[in-house]
Amino acid sequence: MWITAIAATIQLIAAIGKGRVGLVDWTRCDSPNVMTAAPPLIAFAHVGKSFDGGRGATPVVAVNDVSLDVAAGELLAIVGGSGSGKTTLLRLANRLIEADSGSITIDGEDVRKIDPIPLRRRIGYVFQSGGLFPHMSVADNIGITPRLLGLSAAEIASRVDELLDLVRLDRTQHRDRLPHELSGGQRQRVGVARALAARPRIVLMDEPFGALDPLTRDALGDDFRDLHRKLGLTTIMITHDMTEAILLADRIAVMRGGKLLAQGTPAELSNSDDPYVGELLRTPRRQAERLNVLLPRDGAA
Amino acid sequence: MSVFSDPRWSEALAHLPDYLGNHVRVSVTALALGLLVSLPLAILSRHRPIMRGALLGLASIVQTVPGLALLALFYPLLLALAALSLSWFGFGFSAFGFLPAVLALALYSMLPVLRNTITGLQGVEPAILEAAQGVGMTERQSLFMVELPLALPVMMAGIRTAAVWVIGTATLSTPIGQTSLGNYIFAGLQTQNWVFVLFGCLAAAVLALAVDQLLALIEIGIRERSRLRAALGGIGIAALVAATLVPSMARWQSGYIVGAKTFAEQYVLSALISQRLRAAGFSASSREGLGSNVIFDALASNDIDVYVDYSGTLWANQFHRTDIRPREELLGELKATLAQQKITLLGELGFENAYALVIPRKRAEALGIHTIADLAAHAADMSMAADYEFFSRPEWAGLQKAYGLAFRTQRQMQPDFMYAAAASGEVDVIAGYTSDGLIAKYDLVVLDDSKHAIPPYDAIMLIAPKRASDSALRQALAPLLDKIDISDMREANLRAAGGDGASSPDAVARWLWERIGKR
């Protein structure tokens, strides 16, 4: 079964590689038209952030004059290596970190004017390798934000069951388990469920599938993609993996050294003349070609 | 036949409700106070490195002060505070027993609690903290819902350590007037009653273990979210406290409190006084093992009602007099000085317990030493031992000045072991007590103080200010005055050091009464 999945992936990557297919006609036929839609839901405008490098050291510039719009309903992937500033940019959006310069608006409202606590409660956040509270059961982890918002125990319980179904975990089997009793993939599903618990419009994901094995990762990515569409979410996803970004995102933003190098659909990116963007795209292309050669085609469209 | 048929076991057991009850009360209060202070401090300091360093440093310094000294320091401190509060706000409080013990022990409990709470909170992974922020917790919610629950096992380990320390150290609160399991140990050591020493140690150890295990139960209960276990642990602790409270509450009577210092003669005399009071139909309890300087202040501030002191001790230590007066003159002046503090000097018991330089008879004869002046010529080659306070007392300064005494070495020793050490030649000279029965037992001689460098030490009965006009009390104690001569007291002391069933202070006091009561 997994051979089929890989093969499908290969075909897709190969297609992009050859510039033959715009991805639009594959899964994204229902995506909003990004360019012409109403004002962006999330907008970064000339945002800068540097960190104190410790006593006497020069400050490290993590985010350098980044402007980036995310339209409602869009799934944007931010791709970059470690130290590129991608995670910092994400944290600026729900004020886990405060920006030094520029402005960030959500639904037209400057985040600096919003109390960070309610702001965070209405934005879902999926942490790298889950970030689940180790002393709380799956149900308590998922129900945490509704609980902070003051929902009744009964409302929380029914919401938790709903979410367990949504992320395809068995209710009775998983509800009362502790995080350490789950597999990596299950933990990340719980992480996604927790982020969605308070019915946010926006979800921020920090390398959500990074620590998973390729098959789990693939399945989870697809599942999330479906959820994103079904729930009408607006998602920013951080990843260091260009292949993952191409497969899941509507648009991709490439960051390096705190700067935004390029942004656009995979097809648009493949036309970029930036050498680093080209390098990032070369890896999936080469992988696709090699896999193409090494694996026989079956089930080709 | 067995060791447990020794009557001292049942005597020890009879004291258990009182001693254990007081011990639990003082330990639990101290631990609760310690937690109440340490936990918020540790939580406040978690994001403040300077405060954290200062706190841990202070707590560590407190920990290096020996428990006995820490407890002893709190008594004069509180006494001064009580006097201050009385003159400023018009109300005083008792600086004796419970309060200083609780404060010192609470201070003692702080280091493990502070250190483990801080370590536990710092041990929470940054990723988890960020997740707590990310899901929308306030700082307070993050602390109570995430950080504290995750730090709990480490914190509980600290609390358990503190509990065991406090229960162990509480045995040292006896000398400042807090009844505790330490009463067994102090009394046992002074009267060579090893059954008491053992009993006290065992009782303290069992109590510490029990509390430790109950706390462990609570910890597991909280960690595994088993309400049952946490509740069992809590009920256990509550039951322990209740069980030790009830019997001592029942005994909480407004009877007379008889004080005793830390040596066998005092235990016997305090037992004798208590027996007389009970015989006269009063209830009486005792505060034993009190430090020499604590006991007088305790009487002056009405924390105890009656005790036996020695004229020379008060003269030199309490009133800092360096002049030596003839016996009658000294007593007269002492009575007047005490009256200024509204303390009644009821009268003398009839014997003297003076410090005296003592050496083995054979050695004295061989060297031709009869007086302290004779000894001075040989002193440079000799070693000397005395109890813990002698070398810092004015009598020693007086002796040195009068006779030019300078020994090769000076050692401090547990008084009970001194006489045997002199007899075996381990030390050459000891500063013994004239009423000690061991002088005769080990064939030692008391050297003549021909220059009267040591003041007279008549045993005198003192009565607290609030009992000054209590004629019933005077009447009950009158039969003891001028009845006990030095040979009675020496034999009583020798009996008290006998180390068998008949050597308990109570038994010896009964023997002494039989001997003197008909006079």
Image: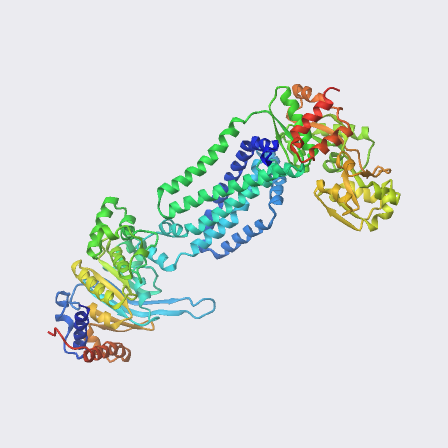
- Name the residue furthest front: B1
Does any portion of residue B52 appear in the rendered image? yes
Q: Is residue A72 left or right of residue A48?
A: left
- Name the residue furthest right: B368
Query: Residue drawn 34% across and 63% down?
Result: A99
Using the image, determine if residue A136 lies above or below residue B513.
Answer: below
Q: Is residue B447 left or right of residue B10?
A: right
Query: Residue drawn 48% across and 41% down?
Result: B210
Q: Decide which of A76, A183 is in the foreground and name it.
A: A183
On the image, the x and y values in percent for residue A170 come to 22, 54
Using the image, determine if residue B417 lies above or below residue B492.
Answer: below
Colouring scheme, one of rainbow, by chain, secondary structure, one colour: rainbow
Corner quadrant of residue B127 = bottom left
On the image, the x and y values in percent for residue A201 come to 21, 57
Using the image, determine if residue B267 lies above or below residue A30.
Answer: above
Does any portion of residue B102 appear in the rendered image? no
Q: Decide which of A151, A210 is in the foreground and name it.
A: A210
